[in-house]
């Protein structure tokens, strides 16, 4: 229910035009047969929890200039101490969104395929097959896994 409501909100906001694009949007697509649980944490103290049902999409805003978000992902809703993470940071001065996947704190999703890309192709895509971590940060100083693209694009993560 939460996932569907967020998706409808994002679709409705997308119809409003360039005002929404300036903030930027992300999507996390759960193509798995299992529910994925999340905690969304923003640099300005925002916090929300919920789930992404199988074959649905979670959508949200990148946030304001200089802000970043981290969406912590796990197969269960009981323990987020070692999550897989989807992360973005906005830089409006250069009209860029920085995005990455992170396994620094843990990798409960290592057993499934996952990838990240930006819809307008202004930045690179990264894909990991199951049991492979080449697309994600594996330690805190692994800056080679951060990608940059235009704020005009939607950053999408796909799981399974």
Image (tube, rainbow, N blue to C red):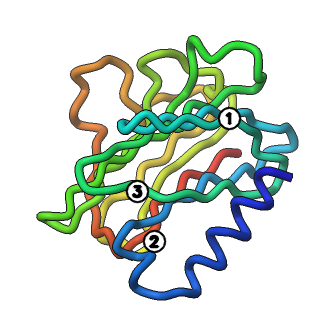
| Position of residue 104 measured from the top left corner of the image (x, y, whole percent) | 41, 19
Q: Is residue 17 above or below residue 37?
A: below
* Dot 3 or dot 2, earlier in sequence: 2
Q: Nearer the viewer, mark 2 or mark 1?
A: 1
- In primary-sequence order, the first of circles 3 and 1 is 1
The answer to whether 157 appears left or right of 113 in the picture is left
Labels 2 and 1: the sequence-earlier one: 1
User: Eyeballing the image, is 73 above or below 121?
Assistant: above
Mark 3 vs mark 1: give the one in front.
Answer: 1
Q: Which residue is mark 2?
A: 119
Alpha carbon distance from label 3 to label 1 = 27 Å
Q: Which residue is mark 1?
A: 49
Q: How far apart, in angstroms, are the residues tagged by discs 3 and 2?
A: 10 Å
Q: CA distance from mark 2 to mark 1?
A: 25 Å
Residue receiving disc 3: 125
Which SS class for mark 3? Answer: loop
User: For the residue carrying disc 2, how many other residues have a C-alpha within 10 Å: few (<14), some (14-19), or many (20+)?
Assistant: some
Which type of secondary structure does the marked residue at label 1 adopt?
A: strand
Q: Is residue 10 above or below residue 128?
A: below
- Furthest-left residue in this view: 93
Quadrant (top left/top right/bottom left/bottom right) for the C terminus: top right
Q: Are marks 2 and 1 in contact (CB under 8 Å)?
A: no
């Amino acid at each position: 229910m939460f996932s569907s409501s967020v998706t409808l909100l994002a679709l409705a906001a997308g119809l409003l035009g360039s005002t929404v694009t300036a903030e930027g949007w992300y999507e996390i697509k759960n193509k798995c047969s299992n529910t994925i649980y999340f905690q969304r944490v923003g640099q300005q103290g925002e916090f929300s929890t919920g789930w992404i049902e199988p074959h649905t999409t979670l959508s949200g805003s990148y946030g304001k200039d200089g802000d970043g978000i981290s969406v912590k992902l796990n197969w269960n809703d009981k323990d987020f101490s070692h999550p897989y993470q989807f992360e973005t940071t906005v830089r409006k001065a250069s009209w860029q969104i920085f995005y990455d996947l992170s396994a620094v704190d843990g990798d409960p999703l290592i057993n499934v395929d996952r990838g990240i890309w930006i819809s307008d192709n202004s930045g690179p895509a990264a894909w990991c097959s199951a049991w492979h971590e080449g697309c994600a940060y594996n330690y805190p100083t692994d800056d080679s896994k951060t990608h940059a693209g235009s704020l005009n694009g939607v950053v999408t993560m796909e799981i399974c």
